Image (spheres, helix red, strand yellow):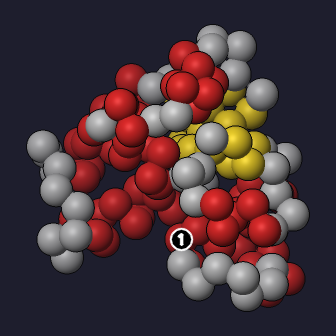
Amino acid sequence: MKLLLDTAAFLNAALEPDRLSSHARGLLLDAGNERYLSTISALEIAIKHALGKIELRERPERFVPTHRERLGAKALRLDEESALHLARLPALHRDPFDRTLICQAIVHGLVLLTPDEQISRYPVRTVW
């Protein structure tokens, strides 16, 4: 399975693994699964850290790649097709970071690992 971790799933895995569901934990530990972390999640973490909304043990520029690599996740850059897919997405969810992750998952055929139940209202496969 090709998994795209949303920001909450990544932060839970890195900081509070007990907050992961047992299913999510199993998917992350399964060596047969490919794991991806979007640069959009890195952007969200950097912005929210700068605003004091996320506390990290280290600066985001060290935290994100260190924990992404520890989870065996590849960096997924935002491509033009995913960015433009935003125009076709219904306005069911207001968070621009989540909406962009949804588009990346749709365009790249990824399963979005997320605890956010609102995301399942979109035509994207989700697991938690």
Q: 102 above or below 21?
A: below
Placement of the C terminus among the 4 image quadrants: top right
**Residue 33 vs residue 8, the one in the foreground:** 8
Q: 117 above or below 62?
A: below
The location of residue 30, given as percent across then percent down, is 63, 14
What secondary structure is found at the residue carrying circle 1? helix
The location of residue 6, given as percent across then percent down, is 55, 52
**Residue 68 vs residue 23, the one in the foreground:** 23
Q: How many marks overall?
A: 1
Q: Is residue 84 shown left or right of residue 34?
A: right
Give the residue at x 73% y 87%.
Answer: 91
Give the residue at x 64% y 60%.
Answer: 117
Q: Is residue 30 shown left or right of residue 64?
A: right
Amino acid identity at mark 1: Phe
The location of residue 56, given as percent across then percent down, is 17, 50
- Residue 28 in sight here: no
Placement of the N terminus among the 4 image quadrants: top right
Give the residue at x 40% y 66%.
Answer: 44
**Residue 24 vs residue 53, the one in the foreground:** 24
Residue under label 1, please give it: 97
Q: Quadrant of residue 95?
A: bottom right
